[in-house]
Amino acid sequence: MEKRVDPFTRTPGIAGAAYIDTKIADEIIDNFTSDESSKYVYKITGLRGAGKSVEYGKVIRTLKDNKKWLVYPLSAAGDVVKTLISKMSMESFIDSKSRTTEVSSSVSASGDIYVASGKGEVNIGKKIAENEHYYSDEATLVKMVSEANKKKYNVLVGVDDISKTPEMVKLLSMIGSMILEGMRIYLVVTGLAENIEEFSSEKNLTFFKRADELEIKGLNKFDITAMYQKLLKIDTLEAKKIEEETKGYAYAYQVLGSLYYGKQKNETISDLIPEFERILFRDSYDLVWKSLSKGEKEVIRCICRTKDGKAEDIKNLMKNKASYPVYRSRLLNKHLVNDEERGYMKIRLPHFDRFVEIWGEE
């Protein structure tokens, strides 16, 4: 008997058999590999758990399989410049090793020797070692990328869940300079909108600020329904009921799919909701809530109290309704709410109102 394997996953960056293509990775890959494209940098943004790392991973894996590309995914922590230099130094065509020249001697000598005169041979031993740290990190990295380009390689640097650190600013500045020089070096990053926005204050990172930003929005409801129907082997109406609980949120789609896959025969969707909420609250919503300012939290509470998210009702519930446009703009930039329906603002996360009801005062 064939062993059943859960096709859904909660591992960051992995979608598995339940992957629903948003086409974002394909857009990046097509532009990076096209001779006609002049796009070198992409920023993938979206809510925590929206699937940013999945699309990033697809770009990294696809171009790694392309023999014309050298791909270097970096951790957002640590000294990213030195890490990139270290990774590139492992390439066979990069000569980054220190070279030593040695002339052997049968005579030892000490002190400074200014003049040697007289007949016969004088063998003076010397050892000349190139200091591998003589050149700056930037000069070293530029030389390595240049060597890669000469070998007909394109270089891709990737950073998942980027955040602003002095080391990251340094790396981005170097990449921007190399792009301006006409070198074939590309960059793809993922991050929360507020973390990417922090780089805007750096004057020498204009290229990064202006680069294409692709937001991962909700998954298509028809795609979710079709995937549930296929993987869970249920009819369309049952699949649609499950889909409605996810609101297109990628992490919710995976979590609820996994819970349904492992449910008992007599359990219904309603029976799964408490565990569904527990996982969302613990793994995602708690972090989202802690990232909000007091003003943003107040607006979210007011949205939840209105039930339908009517803007006028939200403002009437606020202590200072004049601040509504400011916080509305911030929450939209964080992708936490949408204003697709004129005069309304609605939360994009499923069951987030329940989280706010239980934990929203902490």
Image (tube, helix red, strand yellow):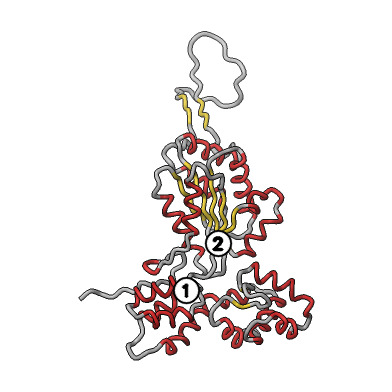
At x 61% / y 69%, what residue is drawn? Answer: 335
Label 1 element class: helix
**Type of residue at label 1?**
Lys
**What is the count of numbered marks?**
2
Question: Is 90 situated above or below 109?
Answer: below
Where residue 105 appears, as percent x and y from the top left, is 46, 23
Q: Position of residue 160 (x, y in %)?
A: 52, 59
Q: Is residue 84 left or right of residue 254?
A: right
Q: Which mark is residue 280?
A: none
Q: Which mark is residue 161?
A: 2
Name the spot of residue 88 as percent of width and height, x first: 48, 44
Task: Give the Cα separation between the discs numbered 2 and 1.
Answer: 26 Å
Q: Mark 1 points at which residue?
A: 221
- Front-most of 152 and 38? 38
User: In the drawing, does residue 325 fall left or right of residue 137?
Assistant: right
Identified by mark 2, the residue type is Asp
* Residue at the (46%, 49%) spot, across then down: 71
Q: In this view, does 235 lie above or below 188?
A: below
The image shows residue 279 at horizontal and vertical percentages of 48, 80
**Identity of the residue furthest to the front in this view:** 342
